[in-house]
Each structure stands twice: as structure tokens, then as C-alpha cells.
Amino acid sequence: MEITKLPAKILNSKIESVSVEEVKRGSFKELILAMKETMKDKQGVGLAANQIGKDLSIFVIEPMLATEFRVPDVYLNPEITEYSKDRDEMEEGCLSIPEYFVEIKRSKKIKIKFMDEKGDKKKIKARGFLARVLQHETDHLNGLTIKNRFKK
């Protein structure tokens, strides 16, 4: 799969939610597998569906990161419900903006609700690097990239 790059409009648009029924039917299994493969091939730590041109509220994260933090590696219809006031700054890059790296301030801790691959509703708390990755990928699904987040 090819990575969609800026200035593609889909990267600046809020993405459509997926239905629980479609998820439970397994409608996105092949797409999710392909997204995981693409993320691995491109050496990313996360990949949102709109980064491959799909208007679907889905993202995947690197399996070893998910294992380390004991969280799923697939997120459907994610919504961050809480951001800590405590923030830190770290350099981020993005597969959709090759060779562009900037310091981005993000919350150190978040709470996120989402649906897993089976269509079950989940809520987790995340901190540190995991929180950063989840915020980055959720931003994608809300039509934001690191270029929107970068404050000079």
C-alpha cells in the first residue's frame, strides 16, 4: 500500500466512524492486516487509515509497543476523553510528511475510548511514548498532522 502524503485533502479532514456491525462482521480484517504490513514496511510506529487514503476511523500501532504497554494494537473510532495538564516535548515525524521532524508538545497521560477488532468497547489509560503515539494517530483521524501541531 502507498502512503498518502500531504497536501492530500483526506489528511486534513475529519474521518468517518465505522459501524459496530461492520466490525463484528469482520469487514475490516484484511484492511487492518494490510495496514499493519504497510506500517512495518515503512518502519512506522503507527498508521491511520486516512494515511492510506481510506475514510475510516481506524489506526494501528506497532505490535511490540502494544505488547510492552499491554494494550491492543488496533483502534477503531478512537476518542481521547482526557488529557493531562502535564506535558512534554519530543521530536515527531510522520509517514505522510517524509523527512519532516518537529518538536511537538503533548500530554504525558491520556484516557482513550475505542472499539477493538471484535467490536467491543474499550477504555484505557496511556502514558509516556504510548500516549504520544495514540495522540498522533488520533490527530490523523481528526484531520490534524504534526504541521498543524507545530508552534514556532
Image (cartoon, grey):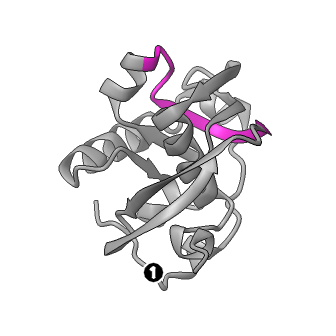
Residue at image coords 47%, 64%: 103
> Which picture quadrant has residue 120?
top right
Q: Position of residue 143 (x, y in %)?
A: 65, 67
Question: Is residue 56 at all visible to an observer of this figure?
Answer: no
Which residue is labeled 1 in the image? 6
78 in magenta:
yes
Q: Quadrant of residue 108?
A: top right
Kindly report the secondary structure that dominates the magenta region of the rendered protein.
strand
Residue occupying the far right of the picture:
81
Q: Secondary structure at mark 1?
A: loop
Residue drawn at 41 percent across, 44 percent down: 31
Q: Amino acid at mark 1?
A: Leu
User: In the image, is residue 50 part of the stretch drawn in magenta?
Assistant: no
Badge 1: how crowded within 10 Å, few (<14), some, or many (20+)?
some
The C terminus, quarter of image: bottom right
Q: Which residues are magenta?
A: 69-82
Q: Quadrant of residue 78?
A: top right
